[in-house]
Image: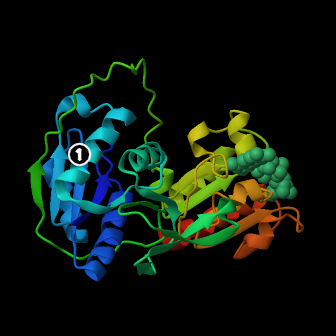
Amino acid sequence: MSILVYIRNVGGQLKKQSLELTAYAKAMADTLNLEVTGLVIGTIADDELKKLGNYGMSRLLKADDEKYNQRVNRVYTRIVEQAVNEVDAKYILFPDNAQGKAIAPRLSVRLKAGFIPQVLDLPSSYEPFTVKKRAFTGKAIATVTAHTERVILTPMLNSFGLRENARDLEIQSFEPHIEEPNSRLELVGKQLSEEGLQLADADIVVSGGRGMRSSENFALLEELAATLGAATACSRPVADDGWRPADEHVGQTGKIIAPNIYFAIGISGAIQHVAGVSGAKCIVGINSDPEAPIFEVADYGMVGDAFQIIPELNALFKKHIH
Ligand code: FAD
């Protein structure tokens, strides 16, 4: 029996979330006296994969035929299912992102396994399997129990953290038997977002709302982000109006992030926005309206004009950081 971790292959690179997921699985494995096995699909170098050993993974199955480089959820689900059977996995972990959300429910149906998304903590019990999860877009925490033989989880980013726990990692080639061709879906194009620090990986996020007034004014936030080594984000109307790229939109209908520091600048703090950032360890609200709802959730607040405050903050940070 083992714990299987789905490792996301991002163009031959690992993301922090996979290391975190491995550390989470290792903590479960230590309690249950099990091994952590990973599965990665598509081409990726062993040197990159070895990082997983630092967080407690002891075995990794690699389905690296290049025909799998293009993710087709239906095919990936079959590959994971075969890996589950290969290693007799009782617990299967996916990242809580678009990929996890696409594959985990499909797998849950095929395996008749309980599926618990948006997990916030380590299980409090294994018999029966009980864990805390996010509910109602982050406004509540539910404690749920799965009574199935197998359980699928998607732990949320930053809910556990990175804990090193070095193991010798054995990387094995895995050849799934996929009879169906990938013909139901055809990729007709791909548009990669611009290079830069990815939101999900960022420790610091500088985010702007409609209070920034125009697309051009976001240059101020980009400068601040560059000083802090931060990623940039925005509220939904800002993305809807095309001031910022759609993949920067955070909130109920956008990305859910949990950085260490989140700067909400010219953002009112509507519940739908806060739903995407309530996991941040520290929220700094900057708003000219002292009654703005962002101040109800902010750990630090600055009331004033962003166009005055941001250049001053940036100069201060520059002085102290560089
Ligand atoms: P506004 O509400 O217009 O706020 C602008 C803020 O800037 C104000 O508080 C104002 O005081 C401040 N301001 C103005 N000038 C300055 C200045 N010079 N300096 C400092 N501050 C200034 N929204 C999201 O963000 N993410 C979501 O995922 C999302 N999902 C939604 C889902 C549904 C079903 C619905 C109905 C809505 C959703 N929304 C979402 C929209 C959400 O309700 C709000 O309308 C939106 O978040 C408001 O964006 P904002 O704060 O940028 O703009």
Quick check: can you spot residue 210?
no
Seen from the viewer's position, the closer of residues 100 and 130 is 130
Residue at left offset 38%, top offset 36%: 73
Scheme of image coloration: rainbow
Horizontal side of 2 relative to 222 (left or right) equals left
Seen from the viewer's position, the closer of residues 154 and 204 is 154
Residue at left offset 61%, top offset 38%: 246
Q: Specify the quadrant of the image occupied by residue 247.
A: top right
Quick check: can you spot residue 83?
yes
Residue at left offset 25%, top offset 33%: 68
Measured as percent of width and height from the top left, residue 66 is found at: 19, 31
- Quadrant that contains the N terminus: bottom left
Q: Secondary structure at mark 1?
A: helix
Q: Is residue 216 above or below residue 299?
A: above
Q: Which residue is mark 1?
A: 82
Q: Is residue 57 above or below residue 105?
A: below
Measured as percent of width and height from the top left, residue 47 is found at: 14, 53
Alpha-carbon neighbours of circle 1 within 10 Å: few (<14), some, or many (≥20)?
A: some
Measured as percent of width and height from the top left, residue 161 is found at: 41, 72
- Total number of numbered labels? 1
Q: Amino acid at mark 1?
A: Gln
Q: Specify the quadrant of the image occupied by residue 184.
A: top left
